[in-house]
């Protein structure tokens, strides 16, 4: 095996620990190489866990936000400010929902029942 392929194998493969909470730490060189942010996409493919940079296409959702703001009479710089505020609020809400789902999955929080949300028919 040549020195170049050995170096490549060492860059492409790392053994990492999994914590008791099923958490892993992505090696810094992988993190930097993929230009990762605070979220990634995780999938199962052919018996392996694959972690990829998250590329959300939020353009469709952004268009809906803009349509709503325009219908409220915003335009120009004020439209931009309102859009940025709405977008930030939505990101916070999604983060909160994901954290709550993780807490429920970890058994740290009880999930709401159907009756809790919609009430009973009594």
Image (cartoon, rainbow, N blue to C red):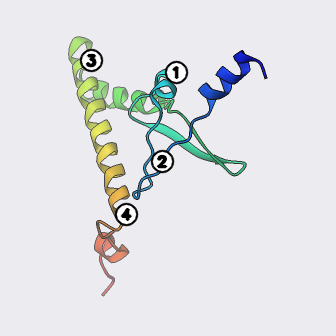
- Residue matched to label 4: 106
- Residue matched to label 3: 80
Residue depicted at x 34% and y 44%? 94
117 to the left or right of 28: left
Residue 45 in the image, given as x and y percentages of width and height: 68, 46
Dot placed on the residue nearer the N-terminal end, 1 or 2? 2
Q: Is residue 108 above or below residue 94?
A: below
Residue depicted at x 47% and y 51%? 18
- Mark 3 vs mark 1, foreground winner is 1
Q: Determine the CA span between mark 3 and mark 1.
A: 33 Å
Q: Determine the CA span between mark 2 and mark 4.
A: 19 Å
Q: Secondary structure at mark 2?
A: loop
Dot placed on the residue nearer the N-terminal end, 2 or 4? 2
Residue depicted at x 67% and y 27%? 9
Residue depicted at x 35% and y 31%? 65
- Residue matched to label 2: 17
- Residue matched to label 1: 33
């Amino acid at each position: 095996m040549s020195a170049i392929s050995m170096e490549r194998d060492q860059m492409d493969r790392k053994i990492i620990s999994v914590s008791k909470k099923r958490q892993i730490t992505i090696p810094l060189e992988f993190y930097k190489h993929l230009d990762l942010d605070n979220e990634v996409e995780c999938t199962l493919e052919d018996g392996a866990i694959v972690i990829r940079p998250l590329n959300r296409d939020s353009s469709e959702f952004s268009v809906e936000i803009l349509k709503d703001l325009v219908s409220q009479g915003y335009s120009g710089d004020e439209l931009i400010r309102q859009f940025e505020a709405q977008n930030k609020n939505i990101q916070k809400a999604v983060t909160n929902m994901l954290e709550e789902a993780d807490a429920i999955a970890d058994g740290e929080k009880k999930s709401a029942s159907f009756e809790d949300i919609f009430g009973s028919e009594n």
